[in-house]
Image (cartoon, rainbow, N blue to C red):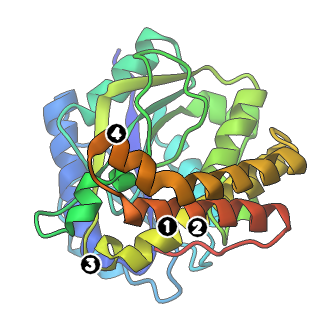
Amino acid sequence: MNPSVAVAFCTYDRPTLVGPLLEAIAAAARDDLARTMVPVVVVDDSPGATARAAVDAYAGAPVHYLHTGAGDISTARNAAVQAASELADFVVCLDDDCLPEPGWLSGLVDAAIRWDADIVTGHHRFVAPPDAPRWMRTEPFLVEHAEYEEGGVPPIGNMANVLLRSSWLAASGVRFHPDFGGVGGEDMVFFAEATAAGARVRFTGRSVVHELLVGSRATFRYQLWRQNWLGNNEACIQVRTGVTGRGRLTARGVRRMVRGFGWPIHSWRNQGTAQWHWAVGLVASGVGLVTGVLGIRIAHRS
């Protein structure tokens, strides 16, 4: 008998994304798994329950709507995986600003069965719109998530595209840590604790979701903030999990800043163009690392 699958995602004050994502999930269930319906859990973490109208207007597969309203991503994710794990053998999660590509669902499920995995991560790809600034397309801003060997064990993971085995989730007790609910990085800590708890984790490149960088996300101001937040979050996560000591993290941050200052010359020699935007981003990331070591935490934002 084929295993059952439920899909879960969290959303916060982005109601216009909910309807299209529900339609995309339904299409994936039909095309990837040859199933007319896969239950979906939508956790609305916005205080004003802004996603409720979009869920009510959807006429497809069963949607289980939960309103947490906490403005805390760890609370929302815990509610999502708990509810979905009670509906099916496997829970598949993605973010509300991601859309799946063909083969998304079947890639995750097939990998879980093939490698008897408790967790399977797929690939998350940033996509620049046609009118995005040239620097966004030509500099490394779109290359954030690595693709690993098929069936390999990824060193890190995120919840933008992942499958969890419900029985493992119930038995392990691993959940999203409340300390990271407001600053982000809760998914990376989850993966670290899952690995420490003995979860069998695998990667498949057959499952892909893409995130279109539109609006404010296509601005240098946002991308600069993001690099600073990523560095800060990196330090907070590694201090929390004990992966790297504070001294080594500080040295890494300083090296990253130095690399940023030299990046225009490096990129000019190797690619024939001075990538000034990425150079500033590297410096911002290094600063974020150092501030994270000092205990300063930068709040996550959409």
> CA separation, marks 1 and 4?
18 Å
Mark 4, other Cα within 10 Å: few <14 / some 14–19 / many ≥20: few
Residue ID for mark 1: 280
Q: Nearer the viewer, residue 233 or 15?
A: 233
N-term mark: 3 or 1: 3
Whether pointer 2 and pointer 1 mark residues with C-beta atoms closer than 8 Å, the reply is yes
Residue 24 percent coordinates (x, y): 19, 52
Residue at 77% x, 28% y is 197
Nearer mark to the viewer, of 3 and 2 = 2
N-term mark: 3 or 2: 3
Which label was assigned to residue 284? 2
> CA separation, marks 4 and 2?
22 Å
> CA separation, marks 3 and 1?
21 Å
Nearer mark to the viewer, of 3 and 4 = 4
Give the amino acid at mark 3: Gly
* 164 in relation to 236, above or below: above
Residue ID for mark 4: 270
Q: Residue furthest bottom?
A: 48
| Secondary-structure class at tag 1 | helix
N-term mark: 3 or 4: 3
